[in-house]
Image (cartoon, grey):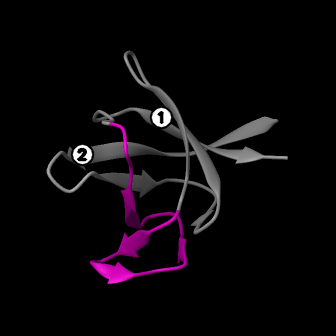
Amino acid sequence: MAEVEVGHVNKYFDKIGVGMIQVTQGELSQGDTIHIKGNTTDITATISSMQVNRQPAQTAKPGEEAGIKLDTKVRQNDKVYKVTA
């Protein structure tokens, strides 16, 4: 499986389990599989819930910050990759 870098993590909210991902290139959509990698982070997740500007969204484009529900803690500046078949 190939991976394409699409952005990085800006912040993670522990209490609600949401990571804020800054999309820098490409596009993220609900149902996409992402791989988040950093110094102490290495997780793969499928996007089941996403918000852009605090509104439910199906896609996030470059320049937008997407809030994505994650079960595992991620850290600021972790790289986000979109997994492609």
Q: Nearer the viewer, residue 20 or 33?
A: 33
Give left or right: position of 15 versus 56: left
Tell me which amino acid carries mark 1.
Answer: Lys
- Residue to which mark 2 is pinned: 12
Q: Nearer the viewer, mark 2 or mark 1?
A: 2
Q: Position of residue 45 (x, y in %)?
A: 54, 45
The quadrant in which residue 1 appears is top right
Give left or right: position of 21 versus 5: left
Q: Position of residue 78 (x, y in %)?
A: 40, 32
The quadrant in which residue 81 appears is top right
Numbered circle sitting on residue 79: 1
Badge 2: few (under 14), some or many (20 or more) residues near its Cα, within 10 Å? Answer: many
Range drawn in magenta = 48-72
Number of labels in the image equals: 2
Residue in view at x 36 percent, y 38 percent: 72
Q: Position of residue 38 (x, y in %)?
A: 43, 23
